[in-house]
Image: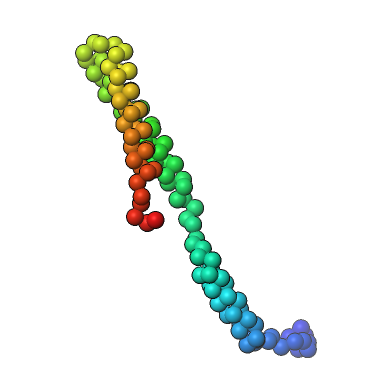
Amino acid sequence: MAADAPGQDPAGEDARIASLEERIAQAERAEKVRQGTQVQQADDGSRLGNRVLAELIGGLAGGAVVGGTLDYFLRTSPWLLLAFLGLGIVAAFRNIIRLTTTKRPDQ
């Protein structure tokens, strides 16, 4: 019985709506070109932050491992550990400065 009930026929796609959507999309593209906006990737800043953190941790850990190992074998207790920790920190900061000051090719 419901199939025989009168109702509205499903309307096909209206040409005016399709034309309006096309014009809106074209206007949005033109506005992006006019403003010169680019879509920024969400991970650009976090990638650099992770790299800086890895340099810091790697410099400290590398200096501690090398200094501690040499101290153990040469029995010079804290001195080589302290020296290599200092060298690891210097190397980490040098890498961080080099990483943040060099101009990347994508810019």
Q: Is residue 105 visible?
A: yes
Image coords of residue 19 (percent x, y): 61, 84
Q: Quadrant of the C terminus?
A: bottom left
Q: Position of residue 10 (x, y in %)?
A: 69, 85
Q: Give the left or right position of residue 5, taking residue 58 as reference.
A: right
Say if residue 58 shows up in the picture: no
- Residue 63 occupies quadrant: top left
Quarter residue 77 falls in: top left
* Of 60 and 9, the residue lying toward us: 60
Q: How is the image coloured?
A: rainbow
Q: Which x, y percent locates residue 82?
A: 32, 18
Measuring 76% from the left and 83% from the top, which residue is drawn there? 2
| Between 19 and 98, the one nearer to me in the picture | 98
Where is residue 51 shown, x and y percent of the image?
A: 39, 41
Q: Give whichever of 73, 39 is nearer the camera.
A: 39
69 vs 85, nearest the viewer: 85
From the viewer's perspective, tell me whether residue 11 is left or right of residue 102.
Answer: right
Q: Quadrant of residue 16?
A: bottom right
**The N terminus, quarter of image:** bottom right
Numbered-mark total? 0
Q: What's the residue at 45%, 50% (across, down)? A: 44
Asked if 58 appears above or below 77 in the picture, the reply is below
Rendered view: 41 above or below 9 = above
Q: Residue at x 37, y 56 (%)?
A: 106
Q: Is residue 12 above or below residue 56?
A: below
Q: Residue at x 35, y 51 (%)?
A: 104
